[in-house]
Image (tube, coloured by chain):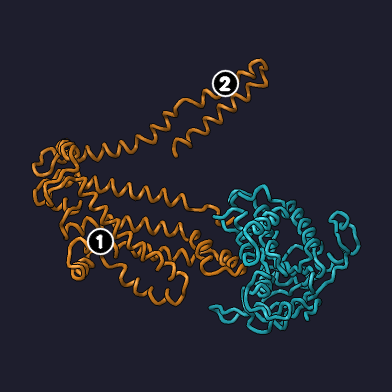
Chain colours: A orange, B cyan
Amino acid sequence: MVSAVFHSPLDAANEARANASTPADKPKAVAAPAPARKARTPIDWRGIVLKVLPPLVGIAALIGIWALLTIKSSTFPTPLATFKEAVHLFSDPFYSNGPNDQGLGWNILFSLQRVAVGFGLAAVVGIPLGFMIGRFEFLSRMVSPLISLLRPVSPLAWLPIGLLVFKAANPAAIWTIFICSIWPMIINTAVGVQRVPTDYMNVAKVLNLSEWKILTSILFPAVLPYMLTGVRLAVGTAWLVIVAAEMLTGGVGIGFWVWDEWNNLNVANIIIAIFVIGIVGLVLEFALIKLATAFTFEEVKS
Amino acid sequence: MTDDSKYIEIHGVEQAFKTPKGRFVALRDVNLNVAKGEFVTLIGHSGCGKSTLLNLVAGLTTPTQGALLCANKEIKGPGPERAVVFQNHSLLPWLTCFENVYLAVERVFAGSENKAQLRARTDAALALVGLAPAAQKRPGEISGGMKQRVGIARALSMEPKVLLMDEPFGALDALTRARLQDELLAIVQKTRSTVIMVTHDVDEAVLLSDRIVMLTNGPAATIGEVLSVGIPRPRNRVDLAEDPAYVHARKAVIDFLYTRQAHVEKAAA
């Protein structure tokens, strides 16, 4: 983004210079475009530096402060110690020494799998429910007080219910993910359906389209951007919650791993886990933003 | 049998809306008959209920009093036999121009025709408004005038008995508007459709209509005057500029709008 902004005025200036020179000396007119094009090809170092430098400075500052604070500490590892530990950890992320000692890679994959199952079930239930709530006034009034009541409840409060019903830790964790990721999907889908421009609905009415055709040709594409926002929020929350849920339920997973390392008093590994959780969350978020922009139609109003 | 001089009948129609401040009467006591093949424009100041009346004929809203009939049948809801060209084109941005029109064609003719025929109809409708080359573009990639033409193509493709147009050229620049008006004149001449069009443009009304229905100022607007425009067709905008009948009709409408119905305009300003 930044590089583009800095790039274009330079370009324009170069082009203007090239154009200005052409009427003055005609023999050079043929050669003039060549230098102008050459001026465009060099890599825009300034733009790249401005784009890359600030994040690097930020990260360096974080590590610097961390290093300063931990110089005399015996309990909290220094950045260097953490880095050494990380290298050791990432050299073999997929080892398996029985159910309670598995590599970091396995732990993340297990967590992601729980999120995927819980979130997938929530999408399967929540998105159609959102459509129905948005489409039918009665249903909307019927369930909106329930949603308002249940939505602010911490997902972890649902964990005992899951344990009670499923009598096992893993389904209970999935249940917790399900319940926390269903709300943003229901609400965003319903709001999206309610905000479909009346113009589009009038088109549907004049054409007398069937409910199925309205759903597939008008509602679904119009609601998709809202829906994807809901999905993004849901994945974000799910990834937040899984760590806490796994701390309570145990088994293989990044949350349990963090708790396990705390019991071993291996603080370096906890710090590494925090970074890893952050990076995975970032990747999930980024992928969904990309997906959402691909399906957003800028031209909604002329 | 249907009486062709009363193809659309509007009988004592009143339209009121519930607002937080109480009942708001937008239209009252509207009586109008539109003949088959007639081109009628509704003109009046902003907020006088022109679009409200058009929506009633479209069946998008139901009147609080009175009745509307089309071909001797009560208008109970919207239907493809009364196609609407909306003020802001209302194309679906995720469909190409072709698909936007095809959606309408498919709805009306899918029962009786095969896919090739439906496609041919869609192509023909787009060709009619001169947009065959833009068929595979999405609304976001074409100009406002082109979008409006796709909207018209979509309405025409349904071969509606009645074409309802709500300020179809309102958002366009003067040159584009003039070209589309000429195109519309030619198309209507060809298809002999019954047209009801809402406009606030006096020249447009006189150029296109057989009759101009002038509405009084709202609230509780009603038909103030109906002017028959006795200018023979085909009409040419350049020749008309000095035609006494044109000048007379134009004067009559302006007189109605700016002399007799001017007070609310002042109050609003």
Q: Is residue B147 left or right of residue B40?
A: left
- Give the residue at the far right of this rendering: B244
Q: Secondary structure at mark 1?
A: helix
Q: Which image quadrant for residue B183?
A: bottom right
Report x, y in % for residue A213.
53, 65
Q: Which image quadrant for residue B234?
A: bottom right
Label 1 environment density (alpha carbons within 10 Å; few <14, some 14–19, many ≥20): many
The label shown at residue A174 is: 1
| Residue located beneath label 2 in the image | A34
Indicate whether B130 appears above or below A23: below
Q: Is residue B221 visible?
A: yes
Q: Which badge, 1 or 2, is on the more N-terminal residue?
A: 2
Report x, y in % for residue B73.
70, 80
Name the subunit of mark 1: A
Of A190 and B46, nearer the camera is A190
Q: Is residue B197 left or right of residue A253?
A: right
The residue shown at (71%, 52%) is B127
Q: Is residue B171 visible?
A: no
Name the subunit of mark 2: A
Q: Is residue A137 left or right of residue A115?
A: right
Type of amino acid under label 2: Ala
Label 2 environment density (alpha carbons within 10 Å; few <14, some 14–19, many ≥20): few
- Structural distance between the alpha carbons of marks 1 and 2: 62 Å
The label shown at residue B86 is: none
Indicate whether A8 appears above or below A31: below
The residue shown at (60%, 70%) is A208
The residue shown at (72%, 65%) is B199
Report x, y in % for residue A248.
16, 60
- Asked if disc 1 and disc 2 are in contact, CB closer than 8 Å, the reply is no
Q: Which mark's residue is nearer the viewer, 1 or 2? A: 1
